[in-house]
Image: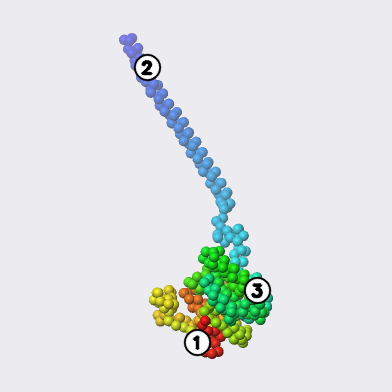
Amino acid sequence: MESLPTTTKSSERRWRSKPLQTSKPSLLMALFSCMAWLYVAGRLWQDAENRTLLAGLLKKNAGQRPKILSVEDKLAVLGCKDLERRIVEAEMDLTLAKSQGYLKNHLQGSGSSSSQILAVIGVYTGFGSRLKRNVFRGSWMPRGDALKKLEERGVVIRFVIGRSANRGDSLDRNIDEENRSTKDFFILEGHEEAQEELPKKAKFFFSTAVQNWNAEFYIKVDDNIDLDLEGLIGLLEHRRGQNSSYIGCMKSGDVVAEEGKPWYEPEWWKFGDEKSYFRHASGSLLILSKNLAQYVYVNSASLKTYAHDDISIGSWMMGLQATYIDDNRFCCSSIRQDKVCSLA
């Protein structure tokens, strides 16, 4: 009977000790959970503080963000606005000058004269035309002192020629040598002398002549005609002061559209269905008054050239208020007795 209590106490001890053993892992897990929770909570708190700080900084600097500059702002910053205004003003002045046929304050060349002369006569010539030049010098064209005296009367005559495609070759040297002897050449340094370049030669001649001489008239003459020089001077004297004068033997004619034929025009299709040339002065001898020659000079870079020089010059005159003067005394192939030119 006395042993029963002992058994009971042992059982109680086993029952009581079992919960104590199972509570240690639970405590450890709880401890780890608490620490993890504290860590996560701390990170979340730190992130919240960082976000708050960043939001405050962004809000504070929102008004200090750089302004997006427009093109106008950039031009102003770079100091280009004033330059832009001056360019516009210069373009307006140039447009006005073109409309009036001259450049304001245009430069005169080294051979220019302050007093206006009557005419500059440019006789087209080529590298192989020395014999023709000598014939002219012995007939209608003065030479030496006589040429100087003619210039004192207000008439300048020059053989007009460009440069060789091979600059400085024997062709150029021969012309330079001849010019040193005769002093009657007008050499177009920027022009390449060639048969197919004759329309461009017209632009170079009128443009350069205007810069070198202050004349009332500028005359282009082919090298296959003879001139009645005194008769020409008399006609020009009669027309002094006639601005916008386009003078010559006026003609028209069919446009040659078939390649290989004489006077072929590669751009024949530009002349309409009838393919007829507009009114223009014959290329043998034609005259432009000063303001028309100045117009060619001012607009030289944009003037269109065709296959023939007289057609090209005629096309330049079409858009102007030029006075067309058709004088059959300038028709060199006619049989009139009082004409001023004839075929050589």
| Disc assigned to residue 235 | none
Q: Residue 147: percent from the left, percent from the top?
A: 64, 78
Residue 192 in picture, x, y percent from top left: 52, 68
Question: Disc 1 and disc 3: Cα gap in Å?
Answer: 36 Å
Labelled pair 3, 2 in contact (Cβ < 8 Å)? no
Residue 141 makes an appearance in the image: yes
For disc 2, the neighbor class at 10 Å (few under 14, some 14 to 19, many from 20) is: few
* Foreground of the two, 126 or 202: 126
* Disc 3 residue crowd, few under 14, some 14–19, many 20+, Cα 10 Å: some
**Amino acid type of the residue that numbered disc 2 sits on in the rendered structure:** Arg
Q: Give the number of the disc on residue 112.
A: 3
Residue type at the position of mark 3: Ser
| Residue at image point 55% right, 56% down | 68
Left or right: 106 in relation to 52: right
Q: Residue at x 62, y 64 (%)?
A: 82
Q: In this view, does 105 lie above or below 27?
A: below
Helix, strand or loop status at disc 1: loop
Q: In this view, does 24 lie to the left or right of 158?
A: left
User: Which mark is nearer the camera, 1 or 3?
Assistant: 1
Please report whichever mark, 1 or 3, sits nearer to the chain's N-terminal start.
3
The mark nearer the N terminus, 2 or 1, is 2
Question: Where does the image place residue 313, in percent across and percent down from the top left?
Answer: 52, 77
Quadrant in which the N terminus is drawn: top left
Q: Which colour scheme is used?
A: rainbow
Q: Which of 325 and 113 is in front in this view?
A: 113
Which disc is residue 334 wearing?
Answer: 1
Image point (53%, 45%), residue name = 54
Residue 96: in sight, yes or no?
Answer: no
* Residue beneath disc 2: 13
| Circle 1: residue type | Ser
Q: Is residue 105 left or right of residue 221?
A: right
